[in-house]
Image (cartoon, rainbow, N blue to C red):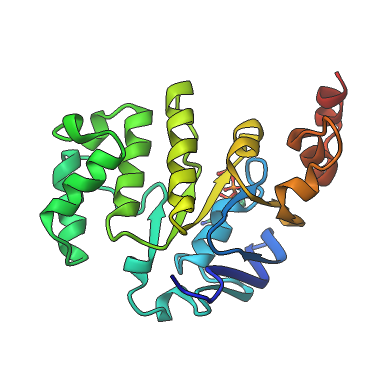
Amino acid sequence: MSNTLPASFRSVSKRFGSNTAVDDISFDVRPGKITGLLGRNGAGKTTSLKMLLGLAKPTEGAATVFGLPYDQLPRAAHRVGVGMDGVNSIPEMRGRKELLVWAKMLGLPKRRVDEVLELVGLADRSDRRVKDYSTGMRQRHTIAGALLADPEFLVLDEPVNGLDPDGILWLRNFLRGLAGEGRTILISSHLLAEVEQTVDDVVVIQKSLRYAGPLDELVSGEGERLEEQFFSLVGSENAKEKVSA
Ligand SMILES: Nc1ncnc2c1ncn2[C@@H]1O[C@H](COP(=O)(O)OP(=O)(O)OP(=O)(O)O)[C@@H](O)[C@H]1O
């Protein structure tokens, strides 16, 4: 595994016309940890991940993976596994077939597809078309694709969305297992209770950066919950009412 930081954002901003989606954020992702990128809808999570992965260009600043912009990183598709809507997805194809396409593009043997299908629990259901998968199956399929090249860094955009309680528990244990092997994981989410049980580090954004650091430094007081801290960082009258209710 590499010694260089898996991900680093330095004074990164992104504007779409007059809309500032991401405003001057700087943070690092620690190796071997699970980091949760948190923010409410429209906070700039996906845009930030896209800039990290070379799918969007920062208006200012730089986001790097292993010390380099993604498009300059040698073997980037092998080192960084990506799970994001619209990336590496051909919904009309059957699950296993689709993974075989990506495996071929990555120069991987067919048996790797069966390995990842087994890992995510889809081995016996991968002959269905991806578009016919349930939301939970699609999430697992996305993670299988991200794992194909056995990457040391996984970037997953909203992997918990749409999972049922079994799926959530599975994902939590699965991600913890991957981190236990020394992998780094960056997930975006707005599901605070779930994130609290899964991540080591937290990055809270609301266009600008509100917090970056260990979860247990953010939620250090007795009985303190991530949800409470989140709302005090991003601010919301409704939220404050909700928290104090
Ligand atoms: N391609 C684009 N063109 C114009 N505006 C965009 C584009 N992509 C994102 N935005 C805007 O940037 C802001 C941040 O969007 P983004 O998708 O990054 O938020 P998010 O935190 O991932 O939200 P969600 O949880 O709803 O997915 C929003 O105001 C969004 O409308």
Which quadrant is the C terminus positioned in?
A: top right
Which residue is at the front of the view, 115 or 77? 115
Q: Quadrant of the N terminus?
A: bottom left
Q: Residue at x 52, y 68 (%)?
A: 6
The answer to which image quadrant residue 8 occupies is bottom right
| Quarter where residue 76 is shown | bottom left
Q: Is residue 69 left or right of residue 112?
A: right
Question: Residue at image x 27%, y 55%?
Answer: 148
Q: Residue at x 23, y 39 (%)?
A: 118
Residue 210 in the image, given as x and y percentages of width and height: 78, 54
Judging depth in this view, the residue of 153 and 203 nearest the camera is: 153
Where residue 230 appears, as percent x and y from the top left, is 77, 41
Q: Is 115 rendered above or below residue 54?
A: above
Q: Position of residue 155 (x, y in %)?
A: 47, 55
Q: Quarter-wise, where is residue 208 in the image?
A: bottom right
Q: Position of residue 225 (x, y in %)?
A: 77, 33
Identity of the residue drawn at 44% across and 45% down: 177
Q: Is residue 42 visible?
A: yes
Q: Residue furthest top?
A: 245
Compare residues 191 and 29 and report the one nearer the observer.
29
Q: Is residue 39 left or right of residue 82?
A: right
